Image: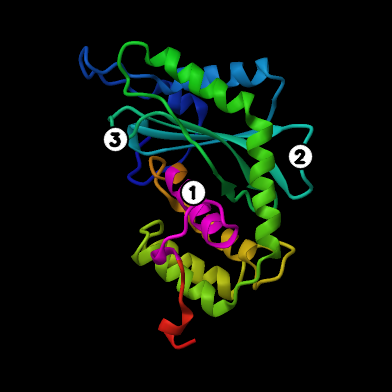
């Protein structure tokens, strides 16, 4: 099985992928270990897995997992997820995070701290266990905070013109999206693929257009870019974090 672009893969594909040797200075943490340990720790904390989706590039040098969770605090249109990224080629350290997903479209939301396992040396497995467990132990607080952001974004109005300016900023200045994703956002703004049950001129509507485009991210980038975008939106519109001049869209510059 070979492919150049990251694509959806099976658990067996990840577990059977060839594991490289980088010498004594770098101990590879297998995708199989991450898969099994994540499920064990979720079960230990009474989380049930509704669905699981995995993506990887050729030979699974970089892999991504998203586990959709059942939980007692679920909202009517968002659910909890646990995501992770792992690599064999040293291009990215192990990462994991509790986040949220929009049920109608599976758009993902990642906010706050992403747990980073340190470089794969020595006690790497122990460190990864601690990172996974930290996220799971704080899952409800993290999820509630994300949903509060979501509800506040629903109440925030931003015009079509400002959405256009934001998309340009995310592409040119922030480099959170690429040209392919910019085109996806344009298409979604003009003809959304999903009904988000919200005013099209809301920050939440625009948020979903962007997170829909981020589904095309490479596995090693998706978590960081999702987090960076969430921080961008909450800093600008919800006053979470310091505002910099470059974060403010002055529509007068666009003749609006």
State the scheme by which the image is colored: rainbow
Q: Which residue is mark 1?
A: 226
Q: Against 58, is 255 above or below? A: below
Q: Secondary structure at mark 1?
A: helix
Image x and y of residue 111, in percent: 55, 44
Q: Which residue is mark 3?
A: 91
Q: Secondary structure at mark 3?
A: loop
Query: Can I make out residue 50 in this image?
Result: no
What residue span does the magenta drawing correspond to?
224-247
Q: Secondary structure at mark 2?
A: loop
Q: Earlier in the sequence, mark 1 or mark 2?
A: 2
Q: Nearer the viewer, residue 245 or 189?
A: 245
Image x and y of residue 64, in percent: 46, 35
| 231 magenta-colored | yes
Of badges 3 and 1, nearer the viewer stands 1
Estimate the spatial distance between the alpha carbons at disc 1 and disc 2, rounded to whole Å.
Answer: 21 Å
Estimate the spatial distance between the alpha carbons at disc 2 and disc 3, rounded to whole Å.
Answer: 35 Å
């Amino acid at each position: 099985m070979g492919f150049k672009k990251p694509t959806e893969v099976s658990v067996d594909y990840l577990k059977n992928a060839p594991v490289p040797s980088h010498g004594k200075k770098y101990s590879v943490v297998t995708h199989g270990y991450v898969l099994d340990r994540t499920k064990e720790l979720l079960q230990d904390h009474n989380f049930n897995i509704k669905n699981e989706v995995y993506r990887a590039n050729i030979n699974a040098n970089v892999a991504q997992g998203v586990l959709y969770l059942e939980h007692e605090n679920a909202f009517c249109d968002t659910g909890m997820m646990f995501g992770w990224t792992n690599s064999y080629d040293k291009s990215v350290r192990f990462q994991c995070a509790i986040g949220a997903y929009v049920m109608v479209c599976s758009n993902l939301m990642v906010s706050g701290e992403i747990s980073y396992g340190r470089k794969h040396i020595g006690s790497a497995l122990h460190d990864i266990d601690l990172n996974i467990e930290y996220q799971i132990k704080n899952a409800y607080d993290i999820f509630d905070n994300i949903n509060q952001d979501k509800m506040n974004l629903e109440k925030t109005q931003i015009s079509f013109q400002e959405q256009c300016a934001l998309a340009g900023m995310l592409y040119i200045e922030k480099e959170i999206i690429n040209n392919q994703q910019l085109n996806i956002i344009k298409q979604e703004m003009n003809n959304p693929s999903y009904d988000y049950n919200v005013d099209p001129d809301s920050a939440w509507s625009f948020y979903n257009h962007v997170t829909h485009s981020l589904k095309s991210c490479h596995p090693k980038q998706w978590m960081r870019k999702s987090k960076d975008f969430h921080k961008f939106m909450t800093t600008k519109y919800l006053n979470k974090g310091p505002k910099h001049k470059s974060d403010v869209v002055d529509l007068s510059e666009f003749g609006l």
